[in-house]
Structure formats: C-alpha cells, structure tokens
Image (spheres, helix red, strand yellow):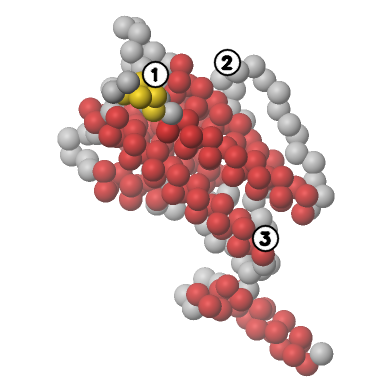
Amino acid sequence: MGRAWATSCVLALLVACAPIQTPPALKNFAKSDTAFFVEAVRTELDQRLAELMIKLYRRNPIQMPPEMTLELRLLQLKSPRISLTEFDQTSSDALLRLAFDPAFQGDRVFAFTAGLQDMVNRAFDGRREFLLLDDFPDPQFIYNSARNIEMAAYLLRSQRDASGQPYLYADGVQDDVLNASYSQILGGLISVQDTLATTLAMKDQRTINAVTRGVASTLFLPVGF
C-alpha cells in the first residue's frame, strides 16, 4: 500500500507541474496505454500531411510563392496553431474550398494541406501530447475529421478549371505508370482516424453518429466546439 500511495503522489505532482519542462522519462511514466496510442496516431497524421505537402509541391511547383521555400512551409504546417491570415480565412473547411476556387490566385497546395492540418489540429483540440489525467479527443470529432478528409480527397480528384485542367495535379499517369500515391496518403489519414475514433468510443462506451452521404456531397462536418 505504501508503494501505491507513493506512486499516486508522484503522478499527482507530475500533473500539477505539467506546464514546466518535465524529463521525457517522467512524462512517459504519467501516461496510459491509450495516451501513447493517441499520440502515435497524432504523430502519424502529422507525418502523412507533411509527406502530402511535399509531394503536391513536387507535382505542382508553380504553386510555391517566390518568397517561400518548402522548409518554411513545413515549419508553418507543423506550428501548434496554423496562421490562416495569408488566406484571409478562419476555418479549415473554407481553406479547403479556397484551394479549388476559380478566383483564387494564391498557393493552392498550402491552402489544401494547411486546411487538412488545421482540421486535424481542431479534432485533437490543438494537442499533440496527452498525460494520465488529460481528456482524450472527442471520438465524434475524430470520425468527422476522417469524413472531411474523404471530402477533400474527392475535391482533389474532381475539381477542374475552365479549361478542364485540375486545380492541383495529384494522382494520374506519369511516364505510362499510374501514380496513386496521393490517394494512398489520404486513405491512410482516413483509416488511422477511423481506428482511433472507434478505439476511443469503445473505451468510453460511446456511440459515434455515423454519417451517410452521397459521394458528391460537399458538406464538411464539425471537428471542434
């Protein structure tokens, strides 16, 4: 009993001191298996989104502004709170739609990937780390984020300009070889969020409100309060 009491005291002190820089080993001591899983999914989502951005810039180099570099764009994407002032937008869904707006003259690659990243950030309540007593993301918002990425993938595949050209080149035949790697990345973003949403819902004995909609629907679901 004495050892259990001492362990509880250590955990309480760690939680109370969370804003202070805590050694990684002690932080890990104050995490549950679920917390490790949530963080692993969050890390994978961030990595896949960065990979998607890199590939889209390679396929659409004309979208990179002259004063910008890929390194700076990646730093912007990984920031705790993405600044949307460049686009005069305040929501991830508006940013995703902007990437396929005929009147938009800006960086469509960053509008698209930043919109996706901002949506994921909101679904995770802006957090990348979860300690023992933290609340986990709402599984409904994680589920909604996955459905929204399905919508974004549809827009990437289907939207064309007045001349019939894609606003953003992605999947397609290159050198007589079908390149479907963009869809694979987006599919991975969807599947890992669905797995996490199901896991968190089962843990808390909650029910996720599934959404059925047509493939051409353009309704984005809420991913935060």
Q: Nearer the viewer, residue 208 or 178?
A: 178
Quick check: 77 above or below 108? below
Where disc 3 sits, the SS reads helix
Q: Are marks 2 and 3 in contact (CB under 8 Å)?
A: no
Q: Are marks 1 and 2 in contact (CB under 8 Å)?
A: no
Residue at image coords 39%, 24%: 178
Which quadrant holds the C terminus? Answer: top right
Three-letter amino acid code at disc 2?
Answer: Ala
Residue matched to label 3: 34
Residue matched to label 2: 216
Residue at image coords 67%, 64%: 33
Q: Is residue 71 left or right of residue 97?
A: left
Q: Nearer the viewer, mark 1 or mark 2?
A: 2
From where the camera sits, is residue 99 visible?
A: no
Where disc 2 sits, the SS reads loop
Local packing at callout 2 (Cα closer than 10 Å; few below 14, some 14-19, many 20+) is few
Quick check: 42 above or below 157? below
Q: Are marks 3 and 1 in contact (CB under 8 Å)?
A: no
Residue matched to label 1: 101
Three-letter amino acid code at disc 3?
Answer: Thr
Tell me which label, 3 or 1, sits earlier in the chain: 3
How many numbered markers are drawn? Answer: 3
| Residue furthest top in the image | 163
Disc 1/disc 2 C-alpha distance (Å): 17 Å
Q: Nearer the viewer, mark 3 or mark 1?
A: 3
Residue at image coords 74%, 90%: 3
Tell me which label, 2 or 3, sits earlier in the chain: 3
| Residue furthest left in the image | 66
